[in-house]
Image: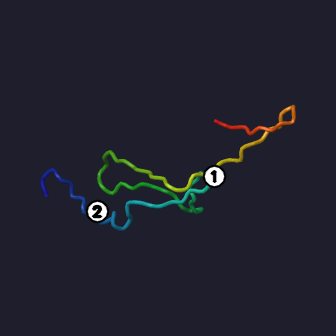
Amino acid sequence: MTPDESPNGHAHCLQLVLGTSQTIPIRDGRLSLGQWQRIFMVELDKSRPREAVVQTFGVARPARHTPVVTRRNGSRARVREV
């Protein structure tokens, strides 16, 4: 070790037990966690700037039903939302 290097072997060992990533399902736009489940970040070494990366993937929500309106003359038209 160099004189300016931090002795942080303990942090590396703890990281092996905790892991570095999780996969959490999303239902109806909300995280699907159990009653007692939470997400938390733990700093195992000294405090320094950190970065968290969140990656989402999956199937897009199905298109909403396009409403149909009836005009005064009896014709029908679909309403398009932009």
- Camera-nearest residue between 55 and 59: 59
- Camera-nearest residue between 17 and 47: 17
Is residue 23 left or right of 32 when viewed as pictured? left
- Camera-nearest residue between 46 and 12: 12
Mark 2 neighbour class, 10 Å CA radius: few under 14, some 14 to 19, many 20 or more: few
Query: Measured from the top left, where is residue 39 in percent x and y?
Result: 48, 56
Q: Residue at x 12, y 52 (%)?
A: 3
* Badge 2 amino acid: His
Is residue 25 left or right of 44 when viewed as pictured? right
Q: Residue at x 45, y 52 (%)?
A: 55
- Dot 2 falls on a residue whose secondary structure is helix
Q: Which quadrant of the rendered structure holds the N terminus?
A: bottom left
Height in image: 73 above or below 66? above
Height in image: 73 above or below 53? above
Mark 2 highlights which residue?
12
Mark 1 highlights which residue?
62
Q: Residue at x 75, y 42 (%)?
A: 67
**Residue sitting farthest toward the right:** 73
- Dot 1 falls on a residue whose secondary structure is loop
Quarter-wise, where is residue 27 in the image?
Answer: bottom right
Q: Which quadrant of the rendered structure holds the C terminus?
A: top right
* Badge 1 amino acid: Pro
Tell me how far mark 1 sits from mark 2, CA to CA.
43 Å
